[in-house]
Image (cartoon, rainbow, N blue to C red):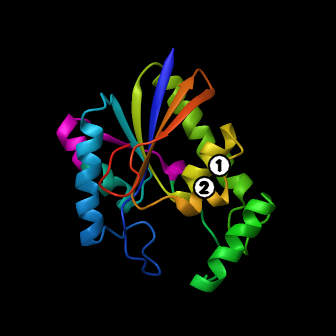
Amino acid sequence: MKTTVYMVRHAESLYTEGTERTRGLTLHGKMSAERITEILTNEGIHSIVSSPYARAILTLEGVSEALGLDIQIMEDLRERHFSDDMITDEEFEPASKKMFDDPDYALPGGESNTVCQNRAVGVLKQILEEYKGKKVAVGTHGHVMTLMMNYFDSSYGLDFMNQTKKPDIYRLQFDEMELENVTRLCSEWGEIE
């Protein structure tokens, strides 16, 4: 029985220190979320699950309204906690690389790839069991999405994550717990592949 999961990386959100859970979408992000709604409304989605972060929820809000489906919030889909310390833009990429090179490496107070992957994959496995044979949209974040996909196929790593957009949609087809196919639904924003 095939289960389809639509990984929806959230739309553009202006980073502001201390607003990780609550920051919304930029104007461009809101317009992109409308495009997400157009694409996903015709996919036959049965359920919507999301990270508790506002930007992920807001990206799928239009789909929820169009289909008359509630968004189920799952705490363990939240973005990874990078560090208790402030990370500068210049430090972010080298730290991400080190985390993908060594999955158990973590910045002070932060989550390693292994820890983040384990919690997120636990939710994904729950979704695959609970919604077997159905289509589910999942509101998520770049690192979390990549680590969930990486669990099933190691070719999804840092290079993959770095080429994803905000927002982005990947349709994952599963047979039981085996990932059979991945299709990117948005190439350059606005185009459907």
The answer to whether marks 2 and 1 mark residues whose Cβ atoms lie closer than 8 Å is: yes
For disc 1, the marked residue is: 156
Whether residue 132 is situated above or below residue 77 in the rendered picture? above
Residue 53 percent across, percent down from the top left: 41, 59
Residue 19 percent across, percent down from the top left: 42, 74
Q: Amino acid at mark 1?
A: Tyr
Q: Does residue 173 belong to the magenta stretch?
A: no
Relative to 78, 21 lies left or right: left
Residue 40 percent across, percent down from the top left: 30, 39
Residue 13 numbered tag: none
Q: Nearer the viewer, residue 36 or 193?
A: 193
| Residue 109 visible (yes or no) | no
Q: Nearer the viewer, residue 141 or 183?
A: 183
Relative to 14, 7 lies left or right: right
Q: What is the span of residues highlighted in magenta in the rendered image?
A: 62-77
Residue 39 in which image quadrant? top left
